[in-house]
Image: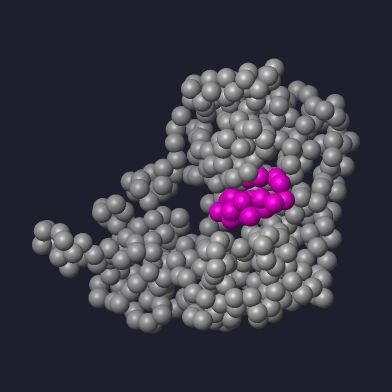
C-alpha cells in the first residue's frame, strides 16, 4: 500500500501531489469505522497481515463475518467495547489521490476528539443511520464541521440495506438535513446513500439503488476540488524552532541561523521581502529549505526552514509575514468556543493558558455572550456558563498579543486552544471571529 509522508520531508516534485484529508463524524453506531474499513478493503488498501489479524479477532469474538470496523478501532478498549474512543488515522492512496482519514468517535463525551479530527480536514463525512434519521449528535457534528470551516461536507445515509434501499427514507433524511443546513454556512454539500456492511455505493455504484444517480463515495473523494480551499494569499509563517548548529565543525554552518515551522498561509520564495512580528523589522528571504536542501517555494502545509538576509532576533512563537499584509496583533479576542471539560464549566473570570499557533500566553474570559442550542441554533443570551461539549461565543483578554486572523480567513492563525492552568489539559477550542 502506498503511504502518505509528511509533505515537508518530500522532494519538491512530490510536494504538489494531491492529498485529501477527511474526517468521519456522526452518532454512535452509525457505522463510521465500518465505512472506513469497507473503503480500505474494497480499494485494496489493506496489508495481508492486517486483514488476517482482523479476521482472527472477528472469529474470536464469535462474529460470522469479518468486522471491518476493527481496521480503525485500534485501541484494546475500543475492540472490547465495540466503540471508537480516540481519533484513528489511516492512510491510503488511489491512482488519482492520496488520503489521510480521521475516524472520529460518535459518543458525546468524545466530542473533543471529533473536533481534533475535523480541525485539519478538507472534507467531512457525517454518517446517519437510515433507520434513525438525524439525531442531536448528527446536528452537533454538522454544526461543528461548519464552525471549523471544513470546506466540503458529505452526508452519507448508511445502513440502507436495513430499510430495503427505500428511496423515500433517503429523500426524507436529505430534505430534513437540507432544511437544517440552510441555517449553517456550508459551501459544498453532497448526499450519498450507502451500506458500509455490504459496500453499496462505497467504492462502486450499487445496483440496489437504481434511483440514485450520483457518484460512489470513493469517486467523490477522488474528484472533489480542493486546490482553491487553502489560503495562498495571506503569507503566514509561525516560527516553531530556531536552528543554530553551534557544535558543527563545518565553517559554512558556523553562522547558520534557520527558522523552522509549518507554512500557515501564502507562499514564500527566496528574495521575498518579509516582516517579523512582533518587532516589525523587515528583511528578505535568503533561502527556503526542506531537510537541508533548497526548494524554490514553500506553501501550506509544507514544513520548511527559512533563512533570512539579516540577523533578526526571532524566537518560537514569533511570526513571519508580508510587510503589506499583516495579521492583527491582538490581546482582545472574540470567538466561538467548544468547551471540553467535564470537571469545570467555562464562565466569565475563568483563567486559562491560551495556545495560538506556536505561541503560548495566559488569558482570562471576560465575557460569555451566548450559548448555542445545537438542535435549533438558538442563541441563549441568558447563559452564565458553558458545560461539557457546549458551544458559545466568548471574549478573551490575553496577557500578550497573538498574531491572529479571523478563522474564516485562515484556519491556522484563526484558532486557539484553551488549556487548564492546573492540570495542563486541553479544555476548549476557539474559532476566532474578531481580534484586535
Is 369 placed left or right of 433 in the picture? Answer: right
Q: Which residue corresponds to the image point at 63% horizontal and 55% vertical from the top-left? A: 112
| Coordinates of residue 278 in the picture (x, y in percent) | 41, 80
45 vs 357, nearest the viewer: 357
Magenta highlight on residue 163:
no
| Coordinates of residue 250 in the picture (x, y in percent) | 12, 58
How many tags in the picture? 0
134 vs 234, nearest the viewer: 134
265 vs 388, nearest the viewer: 388
State which quarter of the image contains the C terminus. Answer: bottom right
Q: Quadrant of residue 393?
A: bottom right
**Residue 127 drawn above or below residue 51:** below
325 vs 73, nearest the viewer: 73
Tell me which colouring the rendered structure shows: one colour
Q: Which residue corresponds to the image point at 56% horizontal and 61% vertical from the top-left? A: 425
Q: Which residue corresponds to the image point at 41% horizontal and 70% vertical from the top-left? A: 317
**Residue 43 drawn above or below residue 248:** above
| Coordinates of residue 369 in the picture (x, y in percent) | 74, 76
Magenta segment boundaries in residue numbering: 104-123
Is 344 placed left or right of 326 in the picture? Answer: right
Please say whether residue 333 is visible from this viewpoint: no
Q: Which residue corresponds to the image point at 84% horizontal and 54% vertical from the top-left? A: 179
Is 169 placed left or right of 339 in the picture? Answer: right
| Coordinates of residue 318 in the picture (x, y in percent) | 40, 73
Magenta highlight on residue 112:
yes
Please say whether residue 323 is visible from this viewpoint: yes
Amino acid at each position: 500500500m502506498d503511504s502518505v509522508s509528511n509533505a515537508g520531508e518530500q522532494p519538491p516534485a512530490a510536494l504538489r501531489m494531491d492529498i485529501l484529508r477527511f474526517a468521519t463524524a456522526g452518532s454512535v453506531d452509525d457505522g463510521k469505522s465500518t465505512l472506513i474499513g469497507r473503503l480500505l478493503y474494497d480499494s485494496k488498501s489493506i496489508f495481508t497481515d492486517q486483514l488476517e489479524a482482523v479476521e482472527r479477532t472477528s472469529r474470536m469474538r464469535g462474529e460470522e463475518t469479518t468486522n471491518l470496523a476493527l481496521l480503525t478501532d485500534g485501541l484494546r478498549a475500543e475492540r472490547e467495547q465495540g466503540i471508537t474512543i480516540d481519533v484513528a488515522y489511516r492512510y491510503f492512496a488511489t491512482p488519482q489521490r492520496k488520503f489521510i482519514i480521521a475516524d472520529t468517535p460518535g459518543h458525546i463525551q468524545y466530542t473533543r476528539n471529533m473536533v481534533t479530527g475535523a480541525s485539519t480536514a478538507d472534507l467531512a463525512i457525517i454518517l446517519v443511520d437510515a433507520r434513525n434519521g438525524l439525531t442531536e449528535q448528527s446536528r452537533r457534528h454538522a454544526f461543528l464541521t461548519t464552525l471549523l470551516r471544513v470546506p466540503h461536507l458529505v452526508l452519507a445515509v448508511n445502513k440502507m440495506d436495513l430499510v430495503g434501499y427505500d428511496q423515500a427514507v433517503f429523500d426524507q433524511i436529505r430534505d430534513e438535513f437540507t432544511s437544517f443546513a440552510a441555517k449553517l454556512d456550508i459551501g459544498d454539500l453532497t448526499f450519498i446513500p450507502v451500506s458500509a456492511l455490504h459496500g453499496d455505493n462505497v467504492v462502486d455504484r450499487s445496483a440496489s439503488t437504481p434511483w440514485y444517480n450520483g457518484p460512489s463515495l470513493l469517486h467523490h473523494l477522488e474528484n472533489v476540488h480542493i486546490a482553491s480551499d487553502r489560503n495562498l494569499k495571506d503569507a503566514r509563517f509561525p516560527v516553531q524552532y530556531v536552528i543554530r548548529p553551534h557544535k558543527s565543525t563545518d565553517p559554512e554552518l558556523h553562522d547558520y541561523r534557520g527558522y523552522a515551522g509549518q507554512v500557515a498561509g501564502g507562499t514564500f520564495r527566496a528574495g521575498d521581502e518579509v516582516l517579523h512580528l512582533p518587532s516589525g523589522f523587515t528583511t528578505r528571504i535568503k533561502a527556503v529549505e526542506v531537510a537541508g536542501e533548497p526548494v524554490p517555494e514553500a506553501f501550506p502545509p509544507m514544513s520548511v526552514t527559512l533563512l533570512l538576509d539579516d540577523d533578526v532576533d526571532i524566537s518560537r512563537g514569533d511570526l513571519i509575514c508580508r510587510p503589506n499584509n499583516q495579521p492583527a496583533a491582538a490581546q482582545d479576542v472574540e470567538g466561538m468556543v467548544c468547551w471540553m471539560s467535564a470537571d469545570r464549566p467555562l464562565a466569565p473570570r475563568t483563567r486559562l493558558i491560551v495556545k495560538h499557533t506556536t505561541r503560548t500566553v495566559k488569558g482570562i474570559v471576560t465575557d460569555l455572550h451566548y450559548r448555542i442550542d445545537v438542535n435549533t441554533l438558538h442563541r441563549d443570551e441568558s447563559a452564565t456558563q458553558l458545560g461539557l461539549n457546549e458551544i458559545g461565543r466568548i471574549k478573551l483578554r490575553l496577557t500578550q498579543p497573538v498574531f491572529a486572523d479571523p478563522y474564516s480567513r485562515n484556519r491556522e492563525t484563526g484558532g486557539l486552544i484553551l488549556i487548564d492552568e492546573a492540570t495542563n489539559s486541553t479544555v476548549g477550542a476557539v474559532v476566532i471571529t474578531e481580534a484586535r
